[in-house]
Image (cartoon, helix red, strand yellow):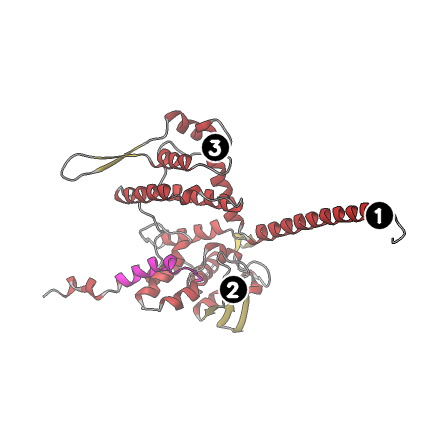
């Protein structure tokens, strides 16, 4: 190398630098692709489906409303128009009661086009929860691109705050599934007989409730390898996959452990999914989260329980019951796997109200 002309040496060095830069860029691309693959695999498919559905709707609205494709960043003014189109135009009625009417604000031809193409199920306004969810996805899309979200602009935040207040006044508050408290759970369990379906459903109800109010996806995803049995009536359940990454041990004992063992023994299940479809006496593949919700709903109907029951009823019922029995919030959250206090406290507060001594004053009248 020392005998090469200086120009040749410089050319070789420059070439080596260029190759090194290309290799570095390629390596960065490989790392980015690997990170993306890891994130995709770690995020529940239901979450991605919800994101994609919201983005498809935002894209359809943009196309129909403005004749162009959705592109980022979205302007603050366009976000404001999205909110107005879907929330509506409120009108305060003149009179002593000062009632409220919210008129549709979306141009009829736009509304009709979105329904005709299947992006909307029906004509008219959206619930505020739907608007919030779609804007949350829009904010996520901006963050993914390293952009500032227009949804965080003060004028948008003020508009959304005002709309939420009006929606609540208009009777459009958040709707929660009915809570399967202990009394309701016992009535549902009483509908489960001794056939294979009854054994399965009893195990689902007890496991979903007593192990800390499991989500329907967590119940559906449970596998035999997730249980560490300490005896015939005691085990520890650890989730391999959870919405919040909860890997803490959950207790499975007494009636719940017995119900699980009876179902697994009757269905001859020793590995794989715990809760499965049934065709008479034939045991099939894993139940879906939707099937878990349908089972809870059906058992509530069999029990004659009033209300709107689904998979979340077990989780809400567990937290409500914990509040009624003055279980410390930290212990409740350790069982449920909630990461944020505000997410669980609304259910705990219901339990606090139900067990309040003040609520018994009417019954103590002379």
In x, y percent, where is residue 63? 48, 29
Residue 47 is a magenta residue: no
Describe the element under mark 1 as helix, strand or loop: helix
Residue at mark 2 to residue at mark 1: CA–CA distance: 63 Å
Point out the frontmost of discs 2 and 1. Answer: 1
Contact flag, marks 1 and 3 (Cβ < 8 Å): no
Kindly tell me whether residue 191 is visible in this rendering.
no
Residue at 51% across, 41% down: 52
Residue at 48% across, 26% down: 67
Instruction: Kindly identify which residue carries mark 3.
Output: 60
Q: Please tell me which residue lies in front, 82 or 185.
A: 82
Which tag, 2 or 1, sits closer to the chain's start?
1
- As displayed, is residue 301 above or below residue 344? above
Mark 2 crowd level (few <14, some 14–19, many ≥20, 10 Å Cα): few
Which tag, 1 or 3, sits closer to the chain's start?
1
Residue at 51% across, 51% down: 288
Point out the frontmost of discs 1 and 3. Answer: 1
Secondary structure that dominates the magenta span: helix
Describe the element under mark 3 as helix, strand or loop: helix
> Which residue sits furthest top?
109
Instruction: Kindly identify which residue carries mark 2.
Output: 247
In x, y percent, where is residue 271? 60, 62
């Amino acid at each position: 190398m020392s005998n090469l002309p200086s120009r040749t040496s410089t050319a070789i060095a420059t070439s080596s630098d260029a190759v090194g830069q290309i290799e570095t860029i390629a390596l960065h691309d490989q790392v980015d692709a690997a990170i993306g693959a890891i994130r995709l695999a770690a995020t529940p498919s239901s979450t991605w489906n919800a994101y994609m559905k919201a983005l498809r709707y935002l894209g359809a609205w943009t196309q129909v409303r403005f004749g162009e494709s959705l592109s980022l960043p979205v302007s603050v003014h366009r976000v404001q128009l999205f909110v107005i189109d879907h929330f509506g135009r409120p009108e305060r009625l003149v009179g002593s009661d000062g009632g409220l009417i919210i008129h549709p604000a979306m141009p009829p031809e736009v509304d009709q086009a979105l329904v005709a193409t299947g992006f909307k199920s029906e004509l008219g306004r959206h619930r505020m929860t739907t608007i919030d969810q779609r804007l949350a996805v829009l904010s996520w899309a901006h963050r993914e691109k390293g952009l500032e979200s227009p949804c965080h602009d003060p004028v948008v935040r003020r508009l959304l705050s005002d709309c939420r207040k009006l929606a609540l006044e208009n009777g459009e508050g958040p709707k929660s599934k009915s809570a399967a408290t202990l009394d309701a759970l016992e009535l549902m369990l009483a509908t489960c007989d001794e056939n294979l379906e009854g054994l399965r459903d009893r195990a689902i109800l007890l496991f979903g409730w007593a192990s800390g109010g499991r989500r329907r996806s967590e119940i559906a995803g449970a596998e035999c390898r997730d249980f560490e049995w300490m005896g015939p009536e005691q085990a520890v359940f650890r989730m391999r996959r959870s919405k919040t990454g909860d890997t803490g041990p959950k207790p499975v004992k007494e009636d719940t452990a017995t119900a699980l063992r009876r179902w697994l023994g009757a269905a001859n299940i020793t590995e794989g999914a715990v809760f499965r479809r049934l065709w008479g006496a034939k045991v099939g593949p894993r139940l879906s989260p939707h099937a878990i919700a349908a089972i809870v709903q059906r058992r509530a109907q069999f029990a004659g329980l009033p209300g709107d029951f689904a998979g979340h009823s077990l989780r809400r019922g567990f937290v409500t019951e914990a509040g009624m029995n003055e279980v410390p919030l930290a212990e409740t959250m350790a069982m449920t796997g909630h990461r944020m206090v505000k997410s669980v406290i609304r259910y705990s507060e219901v339990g606090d109200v139900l067990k309040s001594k003040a609520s018994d004053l009417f019954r103590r009248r002379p």
